[in-house]
């Protein structure tokens, strides 16, 4: 069966809370061109969903990594989608080789009786896709047309090359256990493997900015429309991406509330309140938070997402010279994150006037380079805002260089403070993966690897007795314990039912830097590789 033999309709389902179908993000319905689907709502109820509607191109990109419905073929649905896609087939389409290969996975595949126009019945049922009664020849693994890769294998299905770079990148992240897809487009779950990398970056950076006198704080995520409107020039660049809260329950809010795309307008009214004298300077605050920017471009995990984690520092200084020095200090720390922790070379520099931060004086940046795509990528930015924001929010002090006699009746001259803002996000993780990962999966630098050493017992055969097996497992755990005491993160893989070779490939795909194999001969010689 080819895509020309059937029509593929794609739907975004709405599930009932607690439903076992809650993980399904896309329903793909395959039907002969001469038959009709009928109402989507009716089919949804038969499938067990609350409702479903036609999937838009953005949602199709999120789930299938295809830019539009027109690009989707039957081969686009692979075993990688077993947990996120439900396949609904017309009766006569259930026995193709590709469908048979999908049936070997955990994918939900159902068959449904679709009718010719005018022949519908009220009692058409949905049932599990039946297997052919007659023996069928074993189907060949589904091939990735662009790379020739075996898409039914447990390894990475795409080659790291320009033509399949986006597919490869998302496949590496998913199979490397770094992320999972969420049911809102452009949002992703950071699993422990990736979140630990972010924690390591946090600790490294936090320690160093505190040495510069920066303190951590936290401001609310909500911004009133009144405050946002006050700073039109700055927010203009973010306006299309601002997400708004407009209702509470069934009631329309009197004033709509924005979810912060960045925090200048959240924080600076309070800087004006807290900075009353030059003695209150410098004020250096940082916050670790998440921001929301409702991207309309094709989402990519870590690189372009609708919500992302980051740090944003906001400082106020009496003189420009102090602000300039700090901008460069922070930029150097960003370079350190990439080069010292992530082993990714970056180039520091200054953005053009066109590319600088809206409302700022100038913007410095560290830029990475992704060889496979041949493109540069912004890694982190440190902005000197000048006095633009302090004038907008009236953050000023009396000029200490021009003291005024309090008895003279003369008003002291005001000096607007100089401000900086700087931010680094979880994009760091995406850049690291794009640069280091390969066709076998993740490659994690040891300084940020969530697991640095995996110890795998080997040499266990059918004749190995339970005592010998237990002794080997105990020795493997003892080795991992000794490594942990030495300051490394290490664990053993003693899972039953998996061959050592399968475990080797699995941990290599997850990017673990060092694998130690421990067998009976290694115990005898007190060595390991």
Image (tube, rainbow, N blue to C red):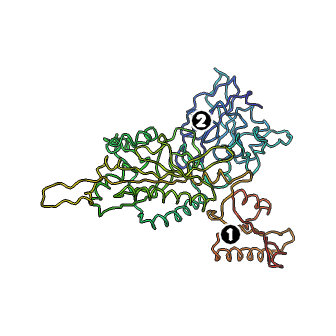
Which residue is pictured at 82% across the width and 75% down the height?
Answer: 522
Q: Which residue is mark 2?
A: 11
309 relative to 489, above or below:
above
Which residue is pictured at 51% across the width and 41% down the height?
Answer: 295
* Closest to the observer, 153 or 167: 167
Q: Are marks 2 and 1 in contact (CB under 8 Å)?
A: no
Q: Which residue is mark 1?
A: 491
Helix, strand or loop at mark 2: strand
* Closest to the observer, 65 or 87: 65
Whichever of labels 2 and 1 marks the residue nearer the N terminus, that label is 2
Does 401 sit left or right of 64 as displayed? left
Residue 13, image x and y in percent?
57, 39
Does 139 sit left or right of 268 as displayed? right
Does 131 sit left or right of 89 as displayed? right
* Closest to the observer, 54 or 188: 188
Residue 253, image x and y in percent?
33, 42
Q: Which mark is residue 510?
A: none
234 relative to 401, above or below:
above
Judge the density around disc 1: few (<14), some (14-19), many (≥20) Cα neighbours within 10 Å. Answer: many
524 relative to 124, above or below:
below
Q: Nearer the viewer, mark 2 or mark 1?
A: 1
Q: Quadrant of residue 31?
A: top right
């Amino acid at each position: 069966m080819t895509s020309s033999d059937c029509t593929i309709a794609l739907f975004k389902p709405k599930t009932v809370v607690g439903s076992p179908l809650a993980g399904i993000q896309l329903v793909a319905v395959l039907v002969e061109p001469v038959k009709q689907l009928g109402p989507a709502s009716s089919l949804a109820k038969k499938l067990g969903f609350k409702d479903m509607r036609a999937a838009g191109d953005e949602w199709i990109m999120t789930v299938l990594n295809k830019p539009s419905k027109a690009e989707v073929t039957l081969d686009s649905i692979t075993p990688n989608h077993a947990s996120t896609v439900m396949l609904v087939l017309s009766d006569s389409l259930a026995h193709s080789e590709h469908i048979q290969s999908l049936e070997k996975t955990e994918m939900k595949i159902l068959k449904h009786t679709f009718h010719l126009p005018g022949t519908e019945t009220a009692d058409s049922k949905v049932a599990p896709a039946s297997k052919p009664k007659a023996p069928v020849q074993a189907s060949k693994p589904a091939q990735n047309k662009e790379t020739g890769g075996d898409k039914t294998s447990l390894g990475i299905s795409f080659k790291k090359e320009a033509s399949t770079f986006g597919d490869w990148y998302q496949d590496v992240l998913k199979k490397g256990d770094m992320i999972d897809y969420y049911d809102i487009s452009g949002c992703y779950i950071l699993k422990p493997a990736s979140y630990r990398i972010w924690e390591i970056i946090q600790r490294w950076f936090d320690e160093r900015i505190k040495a510069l006198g920066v303190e951590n704080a936290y401001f609310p995520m909500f911004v009133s429309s009144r405050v946002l409107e006050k700073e039109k020039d700055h927010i203009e660049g973010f306006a299309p991406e601002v997400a708004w809260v407009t209702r509470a329950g069934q009631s329309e809010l009197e004033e709509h509330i924005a979810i912060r795309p960045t925090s200048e307008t959240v924080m600076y009214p309070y800087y004006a309140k807290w900075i009353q004298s030059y003695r209150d300077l410098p004020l250096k605050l940082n916050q670790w938070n998440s921001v929301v920017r409702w991207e309309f471009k094709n989402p990519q995990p870590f690189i372009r997402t609708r919500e992302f984690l980051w740090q944003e520092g906001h400082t106020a200084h009496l003189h420009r010279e102090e602000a300039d020095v700090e901008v460069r200090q922070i930029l150097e720390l960003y370079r350190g994150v990439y080069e010292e922790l992530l082993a990714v070379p970056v180039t520091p520099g200054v953005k053009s006037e066109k590319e600088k931060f809206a409302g700022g004086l100038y913007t410095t940046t560290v830029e990475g380079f992704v060889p496979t795509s041949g493109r540069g990528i912004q890694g982190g930015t440190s902005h000197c805002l000048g006095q633009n924001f302090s004038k907008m929010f009236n953050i000023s002090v009396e000029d200490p260089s021009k003291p005024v006699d309090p008895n003279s009746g003369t008003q002291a001259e005001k000096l607007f403070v100089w401000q900086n803002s700087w931010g680094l996000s979880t994009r760091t993780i995406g850049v690291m993966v794009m640069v280091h990962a390969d066709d076998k999966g993740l490659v994690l630098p040891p300084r940020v690897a969530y697991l640095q050493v995996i110890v795998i017992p080997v040499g266990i055969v059918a004749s190995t007795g339970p005592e010998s097996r237990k002794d080997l497992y105990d020795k493997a755990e003892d080795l991992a314990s000794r490594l942990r005491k030495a300051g490394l993160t290490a664990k053993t893989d003693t899972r039953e039912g998996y061959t050592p070779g399968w475990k080797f490939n699995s941990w290599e795909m997850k990017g673990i830097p060092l694998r130690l194999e421990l067998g009976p001969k290694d115990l005898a010689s007190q060595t390991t590789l």
